[in-house]
Amino acid sequence: MTKNSHVITYPRFIGRMVLGAFDGTWRFYVWMTALTAIALVGANAWAQQTANGMHVTSMTDHVSWGLYIANFTFGVGLAAGAVMMVIPAYLYDDHEMHDVVLIGELLAIAAISVCIGFVVVDMGRPDRLWHILPGIGRFNWPISMLTWDVLVLNGYLLLNLHIAGYLVYMRFLGKRPDKRWYLPFVFLSIGWAISIHTVTAFLYSGLGGRPFWNSALLAPRFIASAFITGPAFVIVLLQVVRRASSFRVGDGPIRTLTSVLRVTVLLNLFMLGSEVFTAFYTGGTHSTAVHYLFFGSHGRHALVPWIWSAIALNVVSAIVLHSKATRERLELLDFACFAAFAGVWIEKGMGLIIPAFVPSTLHEIVEYSPTLTEWKITAGVWAFGLMVLTLALKTALPVLTGEVSLGGRKEPDADDVPHAA
Amino acid sequence: MSESEEKQPRRVHLKVLGATLGAGAFAYAMAPLRAWTKDISKEQFLQKHYKELNKEELAKVITRLEAETKRDYGRDVTIKDPKPREGVEFGYALNLSVCIGCRKCAEACHVENNHDRKTNNSYIRVIEMEQGSMDMERGTTQYDHPVPAPGKFYMPVQCHQCDNAPCTKVCPVQATWKEPDGIVVVDYNWCIGCRYCEAACPYHARRFNWTKPEIPAEQINPNQGYLSNRIRPQGVVEKCTFCLHRTREGRLPACLEACPTGARVFGNLLDPDSEIRWVLEHKRVFILKEELGTRPRFFYYFDV
């Protein structure tokens, strides 16, 4: 392969991808238009927040992080889970799982975009974003865990862009991907996936002044719940892909992911139980935040409905996942996935961030409940993430099935089973 | 895709229309940002970190800030940049036996440091607690009755200027650091407003500018320090600086001067003859949340 040919074929590849991103069925247009509308409402709310100041949020000096950082944390879990769930593919040499590796990586790219979005909307001075760029600004590495997070999140984004981009491009050229160019990166990205959620947990667990976070169990809990959200999302996503595209997804991957989920929902409940036991059995000042979360404190209980919903969702998903009927009925499985996903969204979102601030470090109780502006921005960031995911799948899958290639378009070939990795 | 030939142009037209509408909607959605970016000059946007500014650059920045204050707040102010003095490390001690919880210190801080008038912000919070317990859980900052109330005692809390400061460690951009004289400062023009320091501080010492501070021109304290009480921009974190614009010039912190009971003792820890050293050596001194290992330069004590 001479260099020249890539100079010609790569722009053509990009061109075809862009064309593919703007063309589809009416369902595609309706979906994208709806997402665009939500994202624009969010963008407008963010522009107002940036211009007028963050007093438009419900955050205060007492509860200085809120819905944005909650969603950021959850998003990191989703991004990590999307790639970690492919571990069985390599651990057990499960070839059918290889097909979903690429889908997991595309999900990771979208989830990281969401995380970066939430960090940016949480900044008081987004105009000073350049201060945090290594080499250009003043990067407080390695002392600040936030700089580690910047490195691992962006590194993870690049890693997955490379793997997904390389595999799709090779497929576009009609070539067999060179293992040396992607396999080491796939393994690296699996390890890296664990690192992004570990570093994000360290961000919180390293703070001695916040007893609610200051627990060594935080990182393991993060990883366990990432193993819920990743598989849960991908199980549903694979079914959507099966219906909306000609990419063939067998039942094998869904079965494998379901068995992962069966273990991790229980593991997550176990760890939650351990923390609850430690807090309540010991009692004292260090358990005030946990008490506030579950039962309220001094007559304030803004988070009580949140956390009990999370517990209910987690328990229900665990029961449904382990019931016999779920093995036969996909709807039940989907229901369990939605429940598990929503449960973790609360538990590793609002349920994780807010209690660390209530009571405050001087034991004052100031409650937090997100304003409309915060909800708009949050919905906008997620809509943006779904747009990224939709476009990534929309452009990559036709290449994998052979519908789009350098040679031109052709009908999907039955023998042409795509092997992403 | 199996579009018939005549359908194609219509589809292209629709796409162009859609893209135009989308771009228009985006511009409309982002419109509030335009006014905001107009307020941020190129010099402001590109301004370097405090420690990277040389003397001329800092002078220029200060001139610009003074002009901005005049423009936005209608007041002529002087912004100085007093440097830490050789052989001086500040320490602060507070006598809990005599503090009556009048909150004059918090009020003086509010005025001295050009705090936002609407939120009545201050770097000091005073906790009222039951005698017989040091559990802040049972205390309150929201008391509203004549002081000192029977059976109560009072504990003002402000920045402890920790030697092992969790807040400076976590800052991703080194916008906050410890000066040689022990004072933890913030470069308000470098802070990105992530509020990680606010989460890290165990003493609730940091404040965020949730909005642009509002102060009537006549109430502005015109004697300002670059790293201390100049009016902060929106979207950045601020904190107590032991009034370094005063203390580095040999004066006392505003909170100490305002205290009617003499509960506050401030001075140079390196000076063996200073009052603060005498207190630390002779009184029953304790440190708030000592178990966290933050090594504060703020001490509480009781009269024997």
Image (tube, rainbow, N blue to C red):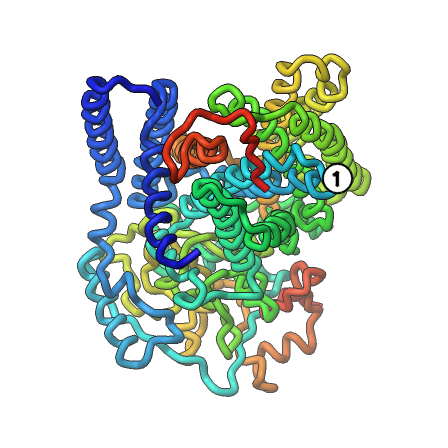
Q: Quadrant of the N terminus of chain B?
A: top left
Res A143 quadrant in image: bottom right
- Residue identified by numbered label 1: A92
Work out whether B40 lies above or below A380. below
Residue shown at 34% from the left, 54% from the top: A7
- Residue B99 visible in this rendered orientation of the protein: yes
Identity of the residue furthest to the right in this view: A281
Work out whether A79 lies above or below B188. above
User: Taking B167 as reference, is A289 left or right?
Assistant: right
Chain ID, mark 1: A
Percent coordinates x, y for residue B200 in the rendering = 57, 55
Frontmost residue, B24 versus A188: A188
- Residue B257 visible in this rendered orientation of the protein: no
Percent coordinates x, y for residue A28 in the rendering = 38, 23
Q: Quadrant of the C terminus of chain B?
A: bottom right
Frontmost residue, A141 versus A362: A141
The amino acid sitting under disc 1 is Tyr
User: Taking B168 as reference, is A192 left or right?
Assistant: right
